[in-house]
Image: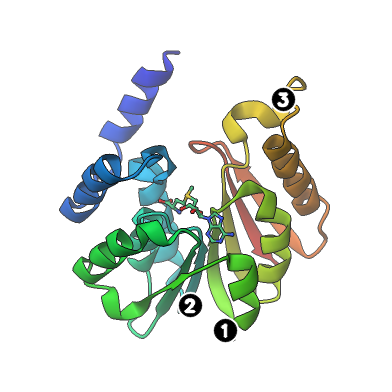
Amino acid sequence: MNEFALEDYLEKHTTGPSELLLEMIRLTNLRTRFPRMLSGHIQGKFLEMVSKMLKPKRILEIGTFTGYSALSLAEGLVEDGKLVTIEYDEEYEDLIRYFIEKSGNGARIQLLIGDAKLILPTIDEIFDLVFIDADKFGYPVYYEQVMEKLHSGGIILVDNVLWSGKVVNPGSKDAETAAIIKFNNIVANDPRVEQVLLPLRDGLMMIRKL
Ligand SMILES: C[S@@+](CC[C@H](N)C(=O)[O-])C[C@H]1O[C@@H](n2cnc3c(N)ncnc32)[C@H](O)[C@@H]1O
């Protein structure tokens, strides 16, 4: 099967992004070096749908980039809900704030700039839904930090767990692949959770705290 034809077919049969998200895609391509980091159309819609199904009161995101996943996840928040999103790179702050303000969910989204590993211990909240999508070396650390802040029955979604398929390629010996493999094994052997690894885009792990 042609990979590009399949991607095209999936996109054509998935509800399209809002005008605001299309603007985000355009500006992210114009103003950032790694626009590929955006969740984009299909994964963004999936995150939005999960959030709308769960109707969370508190969402945490680690790794905002320009805000595609944050805005998508915020669509499912209950009326008095709140999404906290953490981004390390202050270079993206103006773009993120621009889109948060325009989204209509501005009052419910809190952006924190800094290293998530240092910020997480200062957050005094219990979350219903967490999206981990920052540096891959940090995944095992974020996972432990987040488990302490998650309701029983709460969901953690983790992006890039297939790492372009390198997790099943014995020839891939780079440190990031090793970190993802380590993380996937930690989750698979953790009796505190049940999980499903979805082959969506670059692999999305859905973890439920028992
Ligand atoms: C793949 S991008 C996030 C994409 C975004 N979640 C989306 O779906 O559109 C990863 C982001 O994590 C940020 N990041 C990396 N290390 C971080 C850290 N220690 N704390 C917070 N953010 C971090 C990077 O600067 C980058 O913007």
Q: Are marks 1 and 2 in contact (CB under 8 Å)?
A: yes
**Residue 59 percent location from the top left of the image:** 48, 71
Q: Nearer the viewer, mark 1 or mark 3?
A: 3
The disc labelled 2 sits on which kind of residue?
Answer: Arg
Question: The residue tagged with tag 3: helix, strand or loop?
Answer: loop
Q: Is the residue 178 above or below the residue 126 in the image?
A: above
The residue tagged with tag 1: helix, strand or loop?
loop
Q: Quadrant of residue 210?
A: bottom right
- Disc 1 or 3, which lies upstream in sequence? 1
The answer for how far apart the CA atoms under marks 1 and 3 are is 38 Å
**Crowding near pointer 2: few (<14 within 10 Å), some, many (20+)?**
many
Q: Amino acid at mark 1?
A: Glu
Location of residue 62 in the rendering, given as x and y in whole percent from the top left corner: 53, 62
Q: Nearer the viewer, residue 49 or 104?
A: 104
Q: On the image, numbered disc 3 is attached to which residue?
A: 172
Q: Which residue is mark 1?
A: 125
Is the CB–ligand 1 distance for label 1 below 8 Å? no
Question: Mark 3 near ligand 1 (CB under 8 Å)?
Answer: no
Q: Is residue 163 left or right of residue 56?
A: right
Could you give the CA–CA distance between mark 1 and mark 2, rounded to whole angstroms?
8 Å
Seen at 67% across and 54% down, the residue is 139
Whether residue 10 is visible here, answered yes or no, is yes
Q: Which residue is mark 2?
A: 58
The residue that appears at 38% across and 73% down in the rendered structure is: 77
Q: Locate residue 208, reporting x and y percent.
A: 65, 62
Left or right placement of residue 131 versus residue 35 in this view? right
**Circle 2 SS class:** strand
On the question of residue 150 being in view, the answer is: no
